[in-house]
């Protein structure tokens, strides 16, 4: 069923893309690509199974005080085969994805300029051990380290994304508003990219996203999604007044429903 009904959801939890570990960012890339590439998803599943088996073998070696290089090589070959495929597809995807992301970030922050009257510059860099190294050589060179730590220390399961603004890490130097604009731009780029590949519009959900966005950013965002290219959009918020104010400022067709005790009551139909 994956990819049959593609969905893009923007919520406060998206800040985890910036603040949490690399596994969250890898999960995001894998989730987007798997929506339209079943072969990638199959490669990912097979890689993770091989990684699990290799790690279990390394642990067994340590516990039983023996080592069998031939048994380990079986799983090395699987990691190399599927890991290289995953790396190539992630690299290809990000090459197309990053320019779309930059365009959306610029749109969301076009009302803001720095002291030099310039827009904020942002970037996403793909950080992978495979960019400058051969996977097989890495496994051989790190064999003793893997045996000591009892798990695989190199591979595409260590890939990450570096988020920067003005060439500095967004996590350390970005304001709350900048960080929120950053992740919203990522999700809007996901929508645009998925629509382009699938040939139809994903469902777009906004869940309580306005809390840390200034009014101008909110207005820019609503104007953007009111474009027909986005189709139907669902927005949730905890403050009725804030939602009503947004749609009073931006004149687009909408309905507002209040959810109380599991029941839905329409309070606006314009």
Image: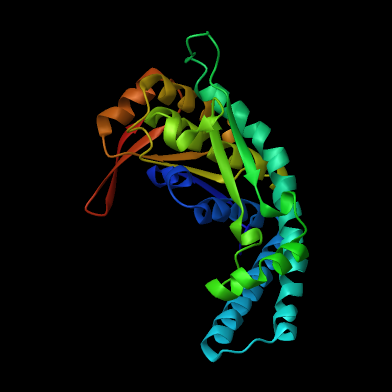
Looking at the picture, does residue 65 appear above or below residue 101? Answer: below
Number of disc labels: 0
Q: Is residue 97 visible?
A: yes
Residue for point 26% across, 35% down? 239
Q: Is residue 231 visible?
A: no
Q: Quadrant of the N terminus?
A: bottom right
Residue for point 68% across, 72% down? 46
Q: Quadrant of the C terminus?
A: top left
Looking at the picture, does residue 262 appear above or below residue 200? Answer: below
Q: Which residue extends farthest left? A: 261
Q: Position of residue 51 (x, y in %)?
A: 63, 72
- The answer to which of 269 and 127 lies nearer the viewer is 127
Residue for point 29% across, 28% down? 242
Instruction: Give the colouring mode of the picture.
Output: rainbow
Looking at the picture, does residue 146 appear above or below residue 235? Answer: below
- The answer to which of 45 and 261 lies nearer the viewer is 45
- The answer to which of 237 and 135 lies nearer the viewer is 135
| Residue 257 location, quadrant | top left
Q: Position of residue 23 (x, y in %)?
A: 52, 56
Side of 16 relative to 5 (left or right): left
Looking at the picture, does residue 224 appear above or below residue 35? Answer: above
Q: Position of residue 212 (x, y in %)?
A: 34, 31
Side of 31 relative to 209 (left or right): right
Q: Position of residue 116 (x, y in %)?
A: 52, 8
Side of 31 relative to 77 (left or right): left
């Amino acid at each position: 069923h994956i990819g049959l009904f593609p969905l893009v959801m923007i919520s406060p939890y998206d800040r985890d893309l910036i603040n949490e570990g690399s596994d969250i960012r890898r999960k995001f890339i894998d989730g987007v690509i798997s929506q339209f590439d079943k072969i990638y998803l199959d490669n990912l599943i097979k890689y993770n199974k091989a990684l699990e088996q290799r790690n279990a073998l390394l642990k067994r070696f340590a516990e039983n005080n023996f080592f069998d290089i031939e048994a380990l090589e079986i799983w090395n070959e699987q990691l190399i085969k599927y890991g290289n495929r995953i790396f190539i597809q992630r690299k290809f995807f990000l090459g197309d994805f990053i320019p779309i992301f930059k365009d959306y970030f610029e749109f969301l922050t076009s009302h803001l300029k720095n002291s030099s009257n310039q827009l904020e510059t942002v970037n996403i860099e793909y950080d992978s051990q495979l960019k400058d190294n051969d996977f097989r050589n890495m496994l051989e060179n790190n064999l003793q380290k893997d045996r000591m730590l009892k798990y695989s220390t190199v591979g595409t399961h260590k890939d990450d994304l570096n988020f920067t603004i003005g060439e500095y890490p967004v996590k350390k130097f970005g304001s709350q508003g900048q960080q929120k604009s950053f992740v919203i731009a990522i999700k809007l780029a996901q929508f645009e990219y998925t629509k382009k590949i699938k040939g139809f519009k994903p469902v777009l959900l906004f869940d309580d996203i306005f809390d840390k966005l200034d009014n101008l950013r909110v207005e820019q965002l609503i104007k953007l999604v009111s474009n027909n290219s986005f189709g139907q959009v669902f927005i949730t918020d905890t403050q009725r007044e804030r939602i009503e104010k947004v749609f009073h400022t931006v004149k687009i067709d909408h309905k507002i429903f209040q959810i109380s005790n599991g029941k839905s009551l329409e309070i606006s139909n314009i």
